[in-house]
Amino acid sequence: MTTTVIVGGFFGDEGKGKVVSYLALKDNVKIAVRTGSVNAGHTVNWNGKTYKLRIIPSAFMNEDSRLLIGAGANINVNIFFKEIRETGTEKRVGIDEQASIIEEKHILEDRGNSYLSKTIGTTGQGVGPAIAERVRRKAKLARDIPELNPYLTDVAGEVNEAIEKGENVILEGTQGTFLSLYHGTYPYVTGRDTTAAAICSEVGVGPTKIDDVLIVFKSYVTRVGAGPLPGELSLEEAERRGWLEKATVTGRIRRAAPFNYELARKAIMINGATQIALTKIDIVFPECKGIKDYDKLSLNAKKFIEEIENKLKIPVTMIGTGPEAENIIDLRREKI
Ligand code: IMP
Ligand code: MG
């Protein structure tokens, strides 16, 4: 039984939602905590339905999992209620009483003609301004909002108790390493640190309690908003390769580039990653779609995975071969 941090290795949108949902179904996950905020959209395909989750943990489909939102998170109250309705998770959701609140004025500040909107290309969800308010010690917290009262809990307390009992715990990161306020491509970053240590800190779990840091890399790199993207392809070339994606939250076109070993190496270092989940291999190698058995992957796909392991020196334990939660080759038994 383990405590696992799931962290994005590039610029977000690596497929963390899909990986978390697979783990939720496969492992007996007692508690799943989501960090970050509504600027991040995690897509989960489950039972023929697509969920675009911005606040509820992607492990929601396991009915035995308690779903928590950590103290470091920023809550948009309307989106929270919309998602508990969509996922039917009302009875299993808890919010840390110290999570902070995004207000209308923060959303306005993040939109329109602002520096954040025009120069940085934020998602316009008010998250950065809400965090700034918190830093000024003026923010409203979850405990100040009467409608949230039934959900309030001590997330750090619940999670550490579960860890103590030896239960499976997942800490779900949002966005990606290079959008980190500290380690990313500043100023073209989000308003918080997005790395594994920060995920732990947002939840209130100490570094000695973590068994695994699973870093999620997509088989190519995408980025939305402004900022450097090494090896960026033209829109035409990205489209030709089938790599053109639309952002979950904003609907913007994601810029695309080939898998980047230099970024991946740095991300593994900063996050102390122990395993890699490699997603969307079926987009780069379409003949691999839906495959569940490593041996049935094409030669080129296997070469790509072996190259990743040789260059990055940690095992690729999960390989995503399609959008559904179950479209995963799970090599954890063989490799760890
Ligand atoms: P903010 O997080 O809305 O302040 O936006 C800052 C930068 O991070 C912009 O370039 C956004 O496009 C990017 N960003 C924020 N959240 C995500 C995400 O979940 N996936 C991808 N990019 C994101
Ligand atoms: Mg996303």
Image (cartoon, rainbow, N blue to C red):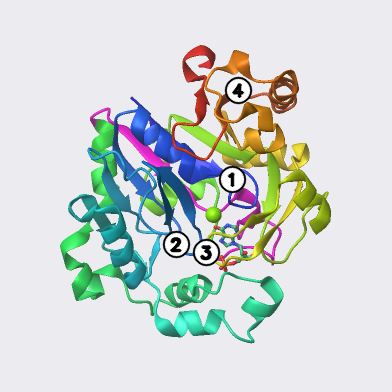
Q: Residue 32 carries which label?
A: none
Q: Disc 2 or 4, which lies upstream in sequence?
A: 2
Q: Disc 1 or 4, which lies upstream in sequence?
A: 1
Choose mark 3 or mark 4, whichever is in front. Answer: 3
Disc 3 Cβ-to-ligand 1 distance below 8 Å = yes
Residue located beneath label 4 in the image: 315
Residue 287 location, x and y as percent?
67, 28
Segment colored magenta? 165-191
- Residue at 74%, 21% (x, y): give it: 303
Residue closest to the eye, 59 or 328? 328
Residue located beneath label 2 in the image: 37
Q: Is mark 1 on a helix, strand or loop?
A: loop
Q: What crowding class fits label 2: few (fewer than 14 Cα within 10 Å), some (14-19), or many (20 or more)?
A: many
Query: Which residue type does callout 4 highlight?
Result: Pro
Magenta stretch containing residue 241, yes or no? Answer: no
Q: Quadrant of residue 265?
A: top right
Choose mark 2 or mark 3, whichever is in front. Answer: 3
Query: Which residue type does callout 2 highlight?
Result: Ser
Residue located beneath label 1 in the image: 14
Choose mark 1 or mark 2, whichever is in front. Answer: 1
Magenta stretch containing residue 182, yes or no? Answer: yes
Q: Disc 3 or 4, which lies upstream in sequence?
A: 3
Q: Quadrant of residue 269?
A: top right
- Residue at 38%, 77% (x, y): give it: 139
Residue located beneath label 3 in the image: 249
Disc 4 Cβ-to-ligand 2 distance below 8 Å = no
